[in-house]
Image (spheres, grey):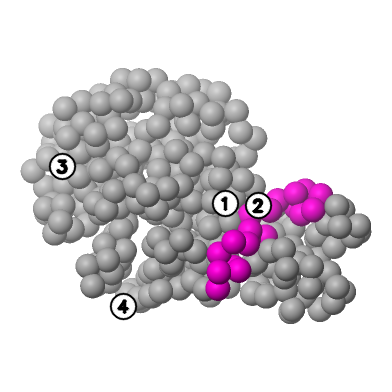
Amino acid sequence: MSLRIKDMESITGFSLGELEHALAAWGEQVFRAKQIFSWIYKKGVSDFDSMSDLSSGLRSQLKYNYCLFDIRLVKSVKSKDGTEKFLFALKDGDLIEAVIIPTEDRVTACISTQVGCKYSCLFCASGLGGFRRNLACSEIIQQILYLYNRKKLTHIVFMGTGEPLDNYEAVLKAIRLINSKESLNIGARRITISTSGVIPGIRKLIKEDLQFELSVSLHSADEAVRSYLMPLNKIYPLRVLIEACAEYIKKTGRQITFEYVLIKGLNSDIHSCQKLVALIKDLRLVKVNLIPANPVKECRIEPPGRMEIQMFRNHLSKHKIPATLRKSRGGDIEAACGQLRLSYGKK
């Protein structure tokens, strides 16, 4: 990547209004912004020269002032189940991951929001290399565009590396961009924000006017166990987290999904399930997404057996708590968060 591109701002971080303002400052008609958006988001071009309905002068000015893509693909791997994982290098040399997960009725992109993660959850490889920085909105959008141009996406989940609510402004700006009819026009209900339980961020989300989905990483209904699994629990303990979730549901009328990684010997027995039922049974509009732990040798964890998983799910159903069981995907390519970046860094 040239020194020139390293110093340039990517136009993919602009909202339509911001681009209109920039063009107006150049004396250009503002409708040109929608043309540029169409080329980027609907036609999937990767350079300004391809924008044939713009004048050569405007194209030259765009090239001089902005770049389109300042991330580059370093490595991609594809699982036998169709899951594809991508490792991108940013302009400062840092690495991030994104994943395409196809099923019969949808194509989901899992997107990163930070370089590394500060929370060091026991079951996740993302934090093993430490936290580096937040991603810019443009870096988030470029992951989505790269994957969208490869395979038309129907759903976006911000469940990759990092804590989305610690990068709140960039993530919400990216969501508004991809939800816009002038760009990818992905419905808000097909966009999911996942949080490890950053309560100030959850309370800010209550005031947003978008109908996106919210997932909260729970993983245990026991304070001590959750603090062991997720050190963030020492800052935002379960009791306060559940209060914030109840407030979110009451004020937005939207459902929360509790993510629950099942780890053998830690949180997958019947007693753990009973505590989970007691914790969330009075909340309305919730469901639990059970996730058998992805074996990560650096984390020294493994999933429970099939019978224990089914027992856990059955107990939730008995108490009328909706529960889904996430099918393991991409196991042959180490598709868990942070694994590709971790293995690449060792080479």
Frontmost of labels 2 and 1 is 1
Q: Earlier in the sequence, mark 3 or mark 2?
A: 2
Residue depth check, mark 4 versus mark 2: number of the one nearer the observer: 2
**Magenta residue check for 148:** no
Mark 1 touches mark 3? (CB < 8 Å): no
Amino acid at dot 1: Cys
For the residues bearing labels 2 and 1, Cβ distance under 8 angstroms: yes
Q: x, y (%) of residue 284?
A: 43, 27
Question: What secondary structure is found at the residue carrying circle 3?
Answer: loop
Q: CA distance from mark 1 to mark 4?
A: 32 Å
Q: Which residue is mark 2?
A: 177
Which x, y percent locates residue 238? 29, 25
Give the x, y percent position of residue 86. 40, 69
Q: Tell which circle, 1 or 3, labels the residue nearer the N-terminal end.
A: 1
- Determine the CA span between mark 4 and mark 3: 28 Å
Considering the numbered disc 4 on the image, is that residue within a helix, a strand or a loop?
loop
User: Residue at horizontal 79%, vertical 73%?
Assistant: 60
For the question of whether residue 291 can be seen, the reply is no
* Residues marked 3 and 2 touching at CB (< 8 Å): no
Q: Which residue is mark 3?
A: 268
**Which marked residue is nearer to the observer: mark 1 or mark 4?**
1
**Vertical placement of residue 136 versus 211, above or below:** below
Name which residue lies at 76% across and 54% down. Answer: 19
Q: Is residue 77 above or below residue 38?
A: below
State whether residue 159 is above or below residue 79: above
Marks 2 and 1, how far apart in space? 10 Å
Q: Amino acid at mark 4?
A: Lys
Q: Identify the element where label 1 is drawn.
A: helix
Give the mark nearer the N terminus: 2 vs 1: 1
At which x and y percent is residue 18? 75, 49
Near-viewer residue (90 or 174): 90
For the residues marked 1 and 3, what is the alpha-carbon distance in whole angstroms? 37 Å
